[in-house]
Amino acid sequence: MGNRILSTILIIGIILRIFLASTTYHSDTAPFDFAGKVIGSGNIFNFYDYLWNLPEDHPYLKIYPRNLFNYPPLPYFFLGGTSLLTTWVVNPVVHSNFILDFESTLGDVQLNLLLFLLKLPYFFFDIAIAYLLMAMFKEKKEKLWVFALWIFNPINLYATYMIGQFDIIPTFLTVLAMFLATKSKYTNLYISAILLGVGAGFKIFPLLLIIPLALIRSGFWERVKLILISGITYVLFAYPFIFSNGFRMTAALANQTTKSFYANIPVSGGESIILFLAVVVFLYFVFYFKKINNENIWKDFFLMLLIFFIFTHFHPQWLLWMTPFYVIDLVVTKFRHWPLFIVVLTSFIFLVSFFDAGLTVWLFAPISPNLYSQVGIWQQLGLNIDINMARSIFHTIFVGTSLYYIYHYFPKRINEN
């Protein structure tokens, strides 16, 4: 009976994903497809310089800014590479227009096929997370619940299959690193350290989790080795591009990497206390002075990510990084924390609505082309609201909920030694 329910959940989940992947579009999808075209034409080590070296009147520069490629190399090479392997079945004219004139492809069924193929790699990481989360529990009922909660959670469906962002990949690598760390074998910790380093090659957030992972070990040099393994893994993927001006100007120093530093308390005319950094250092010392239980490493990872989101104006897809921990929390607490998650979800929905129409109304333009010219939700409702105040209110509500999670999972005992 349990396997039948599991199979039913999986089949419904896959059908839902296929529908969303093929019928929704966000402009963030195109650059990775475009990256495949650039890389496929032989621009490997000069990839980040490609747009910078084009003449001013080049057609690409009428559509894309020169600093378009502002992520680390891995997303572009992985997604661009898979694009080259899967999208050859799409009409070349439609594919070319998708990159240069998206609006002209609306209403063409080939666009739906292309969107599905571009998002296809995400299916494997997504479903793998569901099984990893299930493997973290022992009781059949808990396994079923955590599997279903992941398969149908709206944050994942929205970020991965509607926006089409790749955050599911570093999220998978983080969950796999966490799963391996819960096992008693020390060799698993080295694999976990590598996985976090690879994850940071997609999005920088796994670097926050290296210290809690390393503190599972008790020896100083063992801890240092784990930190170095993660750091070196991360650097290896970026190293081939460090001599590229384009890489240094866009990906290496992207504004997203410093968003968490905006929240600060001025202590003089030119000096401030960076709140995020202060709390991170504090938590690291708490972890240092307590005995880390590898079976509960997910709690320490959860705390670190909560701190990041409290002090950061985050993009909607980033919340996917925390979604596995919300799901684990719901099952571990036997749904006692469901009001917390509902508040988080409500805050998330309202925060998304305050972004541009591309994250809401325009998403379904592939099945209703007229939506692509429509204004945002609040304008359609005829409501003139103070967007900045509204964002502040809902982010504050989100922070209040996050503080309770921190209170609940904050380490209760600290080593006296």
Image (tube, grey):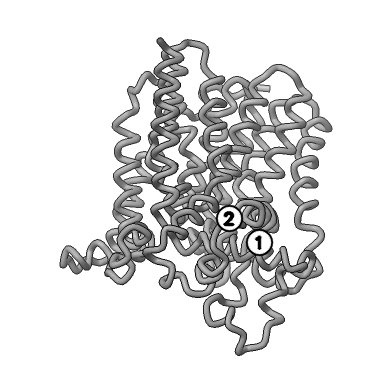
Q: Is residue 290 visible?
A: yes
Quarter location, residue 388: bottom left
Q: Which mark is residue 89?
A: 2
Identified at 55% across, 40% down, the residue is 304
Residue most toward the bottom?
57
Q: Which mark is residue 204?
A: none
Q: Position of residue 261 (x, y in %)?
A: 54, 59
Q: Is residue 209 above or below residue 243?
A: above
State which quarter of the image contains the C terminus.
Answer: top right
Locate residue 167 relative to residue 109 in the image: left or right: right
Q: Which mark is residue 36?
A: 1
Identified at 25% across, 61% down, the residue is 377
State which quarter of the image contains the N terminus.
Answer: top left
Quarter location, residue 189: top right
The kind of residue on which mark 2 rests is Val
Q: Is residue 48 above or below residue 402?
A: below
The kind of residue on which mark 1 rests is Gly
Foreground residue among 367 and 305: 367
Marks 1/2: CA–CA distance = 15 Å
Foreground residue among 342 and 32: 32
Residue most toward the left?
382
Q: Is residue 336 above or below residue 172?
A: above
Q: Position of residue 136 (x, y in %)?
A: 55, 20
Locate residue 111 relative to residue 131 in the image: left or right: left
Identified at 71% across, 74% down, the residue is 50
Using a 10 Å C-alpha cutoff, classify the residue at mark 2 as few (fewer than 14 neighbours), some (14 to 19) or many (20 or more).
few
Sequence order check, earlier mark of 1 and 2: 1
